Structures are given as C-alpha cells and as structure tokens.
Amino acid sequence: MKKKRLIIALMFLSAGFSTIYGQEWVAPESEAAVVNPLPFNNATVREGKAVYEKNCKSCHGDPGKNNPIVLTPPPPDMASEKMLANTDGSIFWKLNTGRGAMPTFKGTITDDQMWQVINFIRKFDPRNAGKLTEEALKKGTLAATINSDSTSLDITADFQGAPLAGVPVFVQVKKAFGMLDIGKVVTDANGKAIFRIPDGTAGNAEGKADFVLTFGDEFEKTQAEVQGIKVAKPVTDNPLARGNVLWSTNDRTSGWLLFAYFFVTGLVWLTILYIVIQITKIKKAGQKN
Amino acid sequence: MTQKLTPDESRQKFDKIFADLTRSLKIKDELARFWIFILGMFLIVGLWGWIHQINKGLGITGMRDYVSWGMYIGNFVFFVAVSLIGLLISSILHLLHFDWGKPISRVAETVAIAAVALAGLVIVMDMGRPDRFLNIFLHGRFASPIVWDVTVITTYVAISTLLFYLPLIPDLALLRDRLGDDVPKIQKKLYSVLSLGWKGNTRQFEIITHAVRIMLVLIIPVGLSIHTVTSWLFANTLRAGWDSTIFGPYFVSGAFVAGSAAVILVMYVYRQRYDLEEYFTDKSFDWMGKMLVLMCLVYLYFNINEYLVPAYKMRAAEGVHLRELFTGRWSGLFWFAQIGGIFLPVILLLFRYFRRPLPITIIAFITLVASWFKRFIIVIPTLEHPHLPIQNVPEHFVHYTPTRPEIMITLLPFFASAIIITMLAKLFPVVTMWEYAEHSGVDKKTMFEDSEK
C-alpha cells in the first residue's frame, strides 16, 4: 500500500518536473476555457500590435520570421503552431503567470491590453484568414504652424480641403539618435488641434528643435515637419558632445589622454625594440672570436 | 659568491648542477604521460564547451543583462594578477639584491608567462563573437580602458617572454653542447637555434647583463600598469563597489598575494618531482612564506581601506552592496575569500613550522583558491545591483548562477596553464643554471669550456 503511494507520488513529481523542464507548458483547463471578452476586429488587433511591439517583440521577434532571442527554452514565434495551439484563455493565463525567462505581465499591462495582444496573435491563425476586413487606408494632409510665442503648434488636418475631425495626430521631436514621442492630440470638428510644446523640451545649441507630426496607422503615411522651432531651452552643454567623456570616440578624446597613451606605449616599445637589437648583437659577438 | 673553487672542484660541482637541473628534461615516465593525458582530456572538454558557446552564443552562460561580466572576467582578473609575480620576484627582489630570489626567478617568469598568455585567451573566451577580436586594434577607442588593457597585456607578454629568454640563452648553449642523446634531435636543434651561437665570451655576457638590467627596470612600470589598468576597467565606472580611487594598488597588492601562492605551489612540485631539494631549499620556502605574510599584510591594509571607508558612510548603493557582502547572499564566499586569502596565511605563516615546504604549499593552495573567489566577489555582486534596475525581468536575470558549460570554459585556462608550465619545464631547466653555478663559485670560463671550441 505504502509502496503504491510512493510510486504515485513519484509519478506526480516527475510529471511536475517534466512540465517545468520539458517543452510543454500547459494552462489549467479551467483557465484555458476562459473566453476573450474583446471582439476580434481591426481596432483591437491594431491596439494589440502596439502592445506587442512594446512588450513582447524584444524576445519573441517578428511574427512569422522565427527570429526570437537566444533563450532556453526559446520564445516561440507568434505565428507558430505551438503558439496558436493555445486557446485565448491559456495565453491569458500564461501572460499572468510567466515561466522561466518568460516574465509575468500581471501588473505591467492591463487585462484589456492582454486580450488585445491575444487578438493580435490570433491574426496569424490560418483559421482566421479573411475574418478581418481589409480596410482601405485613409488619406489626409497635415500642416502645422508655430504660434507667436513658440509655446504650441497649431495643427490642421484635412483631406482635399475637407477638415478631418476626431483624428489622432502624433507629435515627435527629432533627437540625436532618432525620434522621441512627445504627445498626441485629437483634432476638433474643424480639423484643428493645438499641441502645447511641453516645458523642458530640449533644442539644439541655438535652442531650436524639429517637430514631426504623423497620423496613426489607419492612414496612408503622411507627415508634416515643422523645422527650427525656437523652444525655450537651448542645450549648450550636451554631455555626448563634450570632449573628455569616458569611452568617447577617438576624435573626441582629449589631447592629453592621446598623448599619454602614445607617448608611454611608444617609449616602452622602443625599449623593447632596443633589446631585440641587443639580442641580435649576441650572435655577432659570438662570431667574432 | 661563497668560496673560490679549484678548476677541478669547479668542474665537478658544475657537472652535478647540470645533471640535477636537466633532470626535468629527461624524465619520461608513466606519471609524466598520465599527467599530460589528464590535462589534455580536461582541455578537450573545455574546448568542446567553448565551441558550443561559439555556436550558440553567450546565451549558454549564466550571464544576462544584469550580470554581463561573470566568471570569465573574474578569471581574467585572476590570471592577470598571478602573472604579476614575474615582476615582483624576478625584478624587485633582484634589484634589491635579495639573493634568495634568484633561483626562483625562472619559476616566477614561467608562472608569469603562462598566466598572462591565458589572461589574453580568457578575454577572447568572454567574447560572443571572437572573430571580431581584431576590431579592437582596427577601431579601438583610445579613451577606453579596454584598449589600454589590451595594449598593456600585449606589452607584458613581450617583456615577460624576453625576460624569460635573455637569461636562458647561456643555458641553451649549455644544453646544446653538453646534453647527450637523451633528448630528441629536433629539441637539440631548437637549443642550437635559440642559443644564438653563444660562446660565453665577455662581450656576450656584457650584452646579456645590459639587456637584462634594462628589462628588469622596464617591467616595473609595465607590470604595475598591467594590473592598474585592469583595475581601471572597474574603477573608471560609477558602480558601487568599483568606484574607488585605491583600486590600482588594491589590485596590485592582491596580485602579489595570488602570485606568490602560485609560485610556492610550482616550486614545491618541481622540488618533489625533479629532486631539487638543494635548489628550492627549505630556506627558499621560508623566505617565500615571510614574503607572503608581508604581501598579505599590505593587502589587508588596502582591504581595510576599501571596505571600512564606504562602510562608515554607507551611502545608499554602497550600503546595499556591502550588506550583501558582509551578511547577505554573498557573505559565505566573501568571508571564505577574506579569511582564506588573507587572515589564514598571515596568522599561520608567522610560525616557522608552517613555513616548511609541505605546510606552506597547502596554505598557498588555499590562498590561491581564495584569491580566485576574491576576484569573483569583486566582479559579480556589484553587477547584481544596478543604479537603474530593469523592470519585470525574470529572477535569473537578476541573480547570476554560472552554467555548466561556463564552468568548463572557466576551468580550461587552468589546465592550459598547467600544460604550458609543464612544457616549459620539459624544455628548459627550471633554475637558471649558469647563474646558480656562478653563485656557488663556479667560474664562467669553466662552464663554457665546451662552447668556446
């Protein structure tokens, strides 16, 4: 009797180990049966894509390209059979629990965002082919001017003269290594919006900055640039441009450092060269007598 | 010089010295083969691990975003540290006229060469893409301590090799002329090429003495900078536990401890294996013991500075770091490293009993192991506490646990250095013969009688 119990216990134990160390990661049935409360449509998939790119792509890679980062076990591709074999409920549960290198997202993203990203994953399921209507991309033009005291951008969005109302417009500022998102405004009934430039937005040495405005994903790529806006705060002391920064590039390394390096290294290697010459002299000295 | 010997006595004495010191070259028994076999096996296992790592990437190690310098860098610092002994024994003791250091200086140089060569290898093993190694020469930034480190290590390899080679030249001539058919032809050919037509005339001795003297001086700044620059890899950052102004001397003094311990080990092995009790005498061990105590005391002094000053201030990040070391997750290793690497040798080696060859070798072994863990303790705990922690990372990103392949790869340089040391002992006498003979009163003329013809 006791033996039997022991065997059963061992079986449970090994089953436990194999779920942790083996490839399989299975959600409890009750959790797997939970149904996605969000409808599967363009809007939720689009939101889900944004969640995915921000939170998951760094590990799982581009869906369908099978390019995850190196981890054991590897993060499965979103378009893989393994991933799609999960029910919505089981993905939701896995996002909430996490395992090994796969972090838990409980508290990091909202439940809604989880269901959105699940809809995004579902987009790659062949069974869902055709379920999303191909929406034609909207068209529009953006324009912006800076107001008189350089504190806000006056934005106009229209399509062939007709104002575009209720459209989100994203504002970015150009930085040394790319674009920085600084905000989003929605146009009013006249297709107009005012974007207040946040205090402390940094400009270049002359205090000027370049802004870029774009529509969201549902539009054809359109953007407006407003260049050389004088913002309040000039940056004269950019630490990256300073000369003596640690680990800086060669043309920004201070002279004394370069001098010290080459002087010392040169001196030592010249001495070594001198010694090597001495060594050749030993041979000569041997031949003399 | 002890006493003047008659030419006959001289010749007899020198014959004995030659026979003793070439024993290591001739010995070819089961034990030697077994030793090489064992080392070779481990080497292969390590290489296999390394190939695995090159194929799969550094993801197979325990290093993650937090702890991106793991055992490999600890290992690197350890090997650089051990290599510094060449500077201490062959140069400083020599220039200060501590004659007891002379028979040991080749041992010290051997250890130095093996250690510094492998320090270079360890760095390459820490690279995910070793094929990009040359980029450091092609595109290196001169403001980067890493470039300085590569420069100074390369220079130290060159100097150590020269300092090994220069006093060896007369010995090579002796081997060329006096060694019978005990060694393969090709080996004799090697001696003949490397001895550069050495005849033993005054001019040649002048050149050697001159060159050696310059090298003995040059190795001091270079040796000090090799470990100082290595310490700057850490000290030139703003991390708690590294951001310290005494890191240079702290590392250098620690290096002398580790290096002395390594030399004691090698001395003992040579003494037992090649019957060299007369060369590595009880007296040499006694001196090494005293020196180790002195070095440990200096190191203790730097340790007190390194820990007491921040522990008094307990600034936020430093406080977290120090608590982890003293009483936290790392306290076991920390106290093992401190007690085994400093207190144990200081206390025990004060007694003459423990400075006898066997006890001191055991103590040196413990000290050496503790020194390795000390490097580990310097590198890893700091990395576990970044100033700006990453959010929502898995537990094993935060805490570092080395993986099995990583341990195999970390052990590889130990076996490789043992092979290098063995090979050097099989090729060259482990004590400078002519210097030792001269010191025991044998005339230089007598030594090179055969060469002058």
Image (tube, helix red, strand yellow):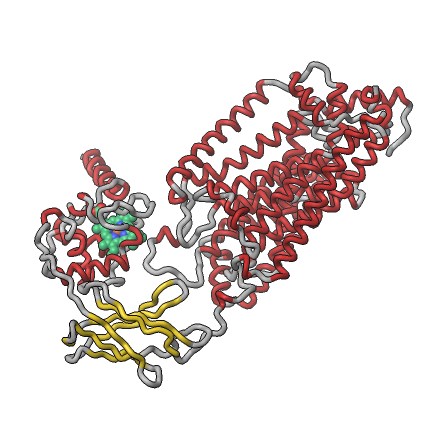
Within the image, what quadrant is residue A220 found in? bottom left
The answer to which of A46 and B351 lies nearer the viewer is: A46
Q: At x 62% / y 49%, what residue is drawn?
A: B227
Relative image position of residue B24 (x, y in whole percent):
67, 24
Direction front: furthest residue: A160
Relative image position of residue B7 (x, y in whole percent):
90, 22
Q: At x 65% / y 40%, what residue is drawn?
A: B158
Residue A99, visible in the rendered structure = no
In this rendering, would A172 be left or right of A158? Answer: right
The answer to which of A143 and B305 lies nearer the viewer is: A143
Within the image, what quadrant is residue A173 found in? bottom left
- In the rendered view of the protein, which quadrant contains the C terminus of chain A? top right
In this rendering, would B365 be left or right of B181? Answer: left
Residue A259, visible in the rendered structure = yes
How many marks overall?
0
Q: At x 29% / y 79%, what residue is drawn?
A: A145
Relative image position of residue B35 (x, y in whole percent):
56, 25
In this rendering, would B5 be left or right of A4? Answer: right
Direction bottom: furthest residue: A148
In this rendering, would A181 be left or right of B231? Answer: left
The answer to which of A162 and B22 lies nearer the viewer is: A162
Seen in the picture, residue A139 relative to B209 is either above or below; the reply is below
Seen in the picture, residue B327 relative to B260 is either above or below; the reply is below
- In the rendered view of the protein, which quadrant contains the N terminus of chain A? top left
Relative image position of residue B399 (x, y in whole percent):
40, 52
